[in-house]
Image (spheres, helix red, strand yellow):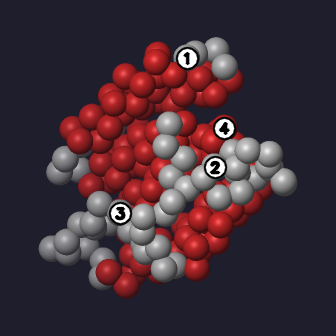
Amino acid sequence: MAKIRKMLGSVDNLYIISLMRVIETQSKATLGNWAVSCAEEKFLPIYETVCPGEQRLREITEKVQEYLKGTLKLKEVKPLLREASQIAKDAEGQPVAQAAARAVATACGTIQTPSNALGFVFYGAAAMAYSELGTEEKPEVYDTFASEVFQQILESLQQAAVPEEENPVKINWNC
């Protein structure tokens, strides 16, 4: 059996480097809205397919969206961010569910930690790869697949990006 990685890809990937450059030009609010929307569209359905009837992550993303609209305070959302992380931990032994839950939880965490706008992408690539390819492929197959996912996600951020954003995040990439 192939070793199952928590996340796929590398910071050396050209799409990831481009993603980092775009992230650096955007505000925390723009990144939060984009990351949560992207996770809801791409990774939450994977989780819900593998865990039918499980609605907690969907409810958490909805509450994070409310926070981003200004109808909830951060102190009301912080416990939900911890719960999302716990949901991912609880999915141990289920690689598809765990990677998807990690992607969603990390995307939601972007509202606090802007660098999560990059982190959720690696978990999401794993979720999509394990969902579509299974868990027995060679590393190079996963890396190629992840690169395709990164390209799609970069394009989605480029579409969501605000030109000449007034308050771009300041990120010190530790990678």
| Spot occupied by residue 28 in the image (x, y as percentages of width and height) | 63, 42
Residue at the location (58% across, 73% down)?
Answer: 17
Question: Does the image show residue 44?
Answer: no
Q: Amino acid at mark 3?
A: Met
Q: Earlier in the sequence, mark 4 or mark 1?
A: 4
Query: Where is mark 2, residue-wise?
Result: 169
Q: Earlier in the sequence, mark 1 or mark 3?
A: 3
What SS does tag 4 mark? helix
Residue 175 left/right relative to 82: right
Q: Nearer the viewer, mark 1 or mark 3?
A: 1
Residue at the location (65% across, 58% down)?
Answer: 24
Residue at the location (73% across, 44% down)?
Answer: 167
Q: Amino acid at mark 2?
A: Val
- Label 2: how many residues lie within 10 Å, few (<14), some (14-19) or many (20+)? some
Query: Where is mark 1, residue-wise?
Result: 73
Query: Where is mark 3, residue-wise?
Result: 7
Q: Amino acid at mark 1?
A: Lys
Q: Nearer the viewer, mark 2 or mark 1?
A: 2
Q: CA distance from mark 3 to mark 4?
A: 25 Å
| Spot occupied by residue 65 in the image (x, y as percentages of width and height) | 60, 28
Q: CA distance from mark 1 to mark 3?
A: 31 Å
What SS does tag 1 mark? loop
Residue 10 in which image quadrant = bottom left
73 over 16 or under it: above or below: above
Residue 53 in which image quadrant = top left
Q: Nearer the viewer, mark 3 or mark 2?
A: 2
Which of the two residues, 139 or 117, is positioned nearer the viewer here?
117
Q: Nearer the viewer, mark 4 or mark 2?
A: 2
77 over 134 or under it: above or below: above
Query: Where is mark 4, residue-wise?
Result: 29
Q: CA distance from mark 3 to mark 2?
A: 24 Å
